[in-house]
Amino acid sequence: MKILADINTRKTDIAVFLCFLLAAALLTWAAYAAWVSFRTTPPYVDREMYPVGGMDISAHNGRIDFKAAARDGVEFVWIKATEGATFRDKRFATNHLKAGEAGIMRGAYHFFRFDKDGVTQAINLLEAVGDRNLELGVAIDVETSGNPKGIDDELIKERIAAMVDYLNLRGLAPTLYCNKADYYRYMADALPGNSLWICSFSSDPISAAWTFWQHNHKGAVKGVKGDVDLNVFGGHRDDWADFIYKQQYKGNKSVN
């Protein structure tokens, strides 16, 4: 009988231990889920302060009903055009055309590759844009995520600056997109004065002056299937009209 009692005691101890492990795992998962929710929950955006809203898109968003999006309050859209030295977004031309037909202000953005020459990337963007009208101008998307590791920061800064300089020579003053960490790592000292498009989930996006704020990666817009990035312009309607006026890209944009 003593042997049976010892066996039952061991079974009870094992059961208690397993319950403890399960409880610890559940608590750990709950804490992680809460942390992820905190990090990714979009901040409150005061639309009285920032009344002009928009989105940014690429081919990954699929076919978009831009007229429905416009009725839903989308006034501008940043459209992916290029990446690196050769890549072209397959839906750029269609997205540009349809957004314009819906009366939405358009900009073209380029995903910057750390391992490619800046001038070559600028030429890729300009050739893809061609002579299309871009009310917002162009933007350079600078992100550590999605780029190769191990490239010297100073070389990356030189390549970004080379792209910016080339676009400026062609009559464009590009907007620079990044998150807070990449702004201070690559741009704060090396590229002052450019319009900033900041990605931030904080109600106070960044201490530096910014022009556009991407505040939500999981937004819902009528006419777009699934999640879409949401943005606001950093000013009132008079500021918006002034920005559009200054960003009008005049003349031939093609590179021949």
Image (cartoon, rainbow, N blue to C red):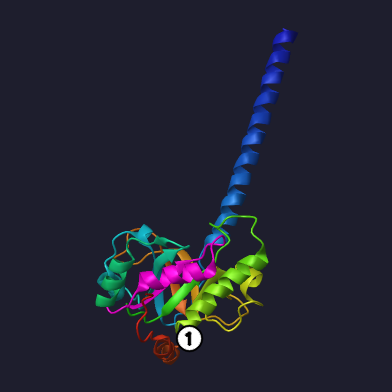
83 vs 52: above or below:
above
Q: Is residue 93 left or right of residue 118?
A: left
Question: For this rendering, which residue is in front, 207 or 30?
Answer: 207
In this picture, which residue range is highlighted in magenta?
103-131
* Tag 1: amino acid: Gly
Q: Is residue 159 left or right of residue 251?
A: right
Residue sitting at x 71%, y 19%: 9
Question: For this rendering, which residue is in front, 132 or 251?
Answer: 251
Residue sitting at x 47%, y 71%: 122
Residue sitting at x 61%, y 71%: 158
Question: For this rendering, which residue is in front, 236 or 113?
Answer: 113
Q: Quadrant of the C terminus?
A: bottom left
Question: For this rendering, which residue is in front, 221 or 182?
Answer: 182
Residue sitting at x 45%, y 68%: 110
Mark 1 — residue?
A: 235
Which x, y percent locates residue 14? 68, 24
